[in-house]
């Protein structure tokens, strides 16, 4: 299912529609510091960042717990899609609401939630440039120390309005089949070149990339202000991927976050044959039987 609505919303449009009851604004920030050494994985909810300042009426979405399968072996693991739909519904997100997503990290976390919502049939929009763009435009902010937890123990949420799309995701077994040549697909890593090559510290178990992968750093898709580049520029940057076969493009990174930025950019230029490897390198590198390659300089 492809929506004709742009994945992006500008600061000007959002400010103009602040009183629109059809919009619901969500801060999706997560705290994930850069690694100081290999295996230095530190992550926590971005609720404290939300408390320090947020767009008026915005609620914080917790990607570390409320919207993750915490029983999985890796962070931010996608819950079963029917369960994910229920969790979103308990937060008041249904087909009758258009979620507007932003974060304090140039939209990386917002892209992840956008893809999650898309996989249960919800059309969301990402604030282009995120919280920085909002503040740089001189728009109002609020500060709070607590928010109402809109998750409840209610379980009788109807699923009739949700249309799950499992093909937007792939798992480790599918990636293994691609690496072994037993399945179609082109692997694309959205991490920086130094992490891809294994020349920089990684927060994951081992350095390197999945064999056969292409590298297109997600930050190459954003301008200096953290906004997505114009479609014509995205076409040029993404051209090396567009000429690749076979499809789908299987996007991954460390934890399915930077990969989501690639997914947004590819969607902006009309590409649909793509999916995200949810476990990404956090899951892959933790299994010593799975291969990783490095390209030392």
Image (tube, rainbow, N blue to C red):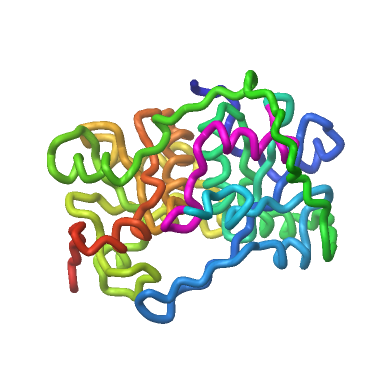
Residue 166 relative to residue 122: left or right: left
Please state if 54 lies on the left or on the right of 194 as rendered. Answer: right
Q: Quadrant of residue 294?
A: bottom left
Compared across the picture, whether 10 is left or right of 169 comes to right
**Would you place residue 203 above or below residue 154 in this image?**
below
Residue 17 on the magenta span = no
Image label count: 0
Camera-side residue of 256 and 149 = 149
Q: Position of residue 235 (x, y in %)?
A: 38, 38
Q: Is residue 146 above or below residue 22?
A: below
Please tell me whether residue 78 belongs to the stretch shown in magenta: yes
Percent coordinates x, y for residue 213 in the rendering: 23, 50
Q: Residue at x 36, y 71 (%)?
A: 202
**Residue 291 or 264: which is nearer the viewer?**
291
Q: Evaluate whether residue 151 shows in this view.
A: yes
Task: Please give the range of residues in magenta.
Answer: 72-94
Place of residue 291 in the rendered image (x, y in percent of width and height, measured from the top left):
18, 58
Q: Residue at x 55, y 31 (%)?
A: 82
> In the picture shown, does residue 292 fall above or below 97?
below
Residue at 71 percent across and 29 percent down: it is 156
**Does 239 sit left or right of 102 as displayed?**
left
Along the line of sight, the residue nearer the viewer: 43 or 287: 287
Q: Quadrant of residue 181?
A: top left
Asked whether the viewer can see residue 237, the reply is no
Q: Extreme left residue here?
A: 181
Image location (x, y in percent) of residue 234:
42, 42
The C terminus lies in which quarter of the figure?
A: bottom left
Q: Residue furthest bottom?
A: 36
Residue drawn at x 49%, y 21% is: 1
């Amino acid at each position: 299912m492809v929506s004709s609505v742009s994945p992006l919303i500008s600061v000007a449009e959002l400010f103009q529609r602040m009183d629109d009851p059809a919009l619901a604004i969500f801060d999706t920030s997560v705290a994930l510091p850069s690694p100081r050494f290999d295996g230095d994985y530190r992550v926590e909810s971005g609720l404290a960042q939300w408390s320090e300042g947020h767009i008026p009426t915005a609620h914080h979405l917790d990607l570390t717990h409320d919207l993750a399968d915490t029983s999985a072996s890796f962070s931010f693991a996608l819950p079963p899609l029917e369960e994910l739909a229920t969790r979103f519904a308990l937060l008041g997100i249904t087909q009758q609401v258009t979620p507007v997503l932003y974060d304090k990290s140039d939209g990386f976390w917002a892209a992840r939630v956008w893809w999650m919502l898309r996989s249960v049939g919800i059309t969301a929009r990402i604030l282009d440039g995120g919280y920085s763009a909002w503040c740089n435009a001189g728009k109002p902010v609020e500060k709070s120390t607590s928010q109402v937890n809109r998750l409840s123990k209610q379980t009788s949420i109807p699923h009739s309005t949700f249309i799950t799309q499992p093909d937007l995701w792939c798992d480790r077994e599918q990636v293994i089949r691609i690496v072994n040549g037993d399945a179609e697909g082109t692997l694309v890593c959205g991490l920086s070149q130094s992490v891809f090559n294994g020349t920089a510290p990684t927060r994951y178990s081992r350095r390197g990339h999945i064999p056969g992968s292409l590298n297109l750093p997600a930050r190459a898709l954003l301008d200096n202000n953290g906004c997505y580049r114009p479609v014509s520029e995205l076409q040029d940057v993404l051209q090396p991927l567009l000429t690749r076969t076979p499809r789908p493009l299987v996007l991954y990174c460390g934890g399915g976050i930077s990969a989501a930025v690639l997914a947004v950019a590819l969607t902006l230029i009309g590409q649909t044959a793509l999916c995200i490897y949810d476990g990404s390198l956090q899951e892959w590198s933790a299994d010593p039987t799975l291969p990783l390659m490095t390209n030392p300089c």
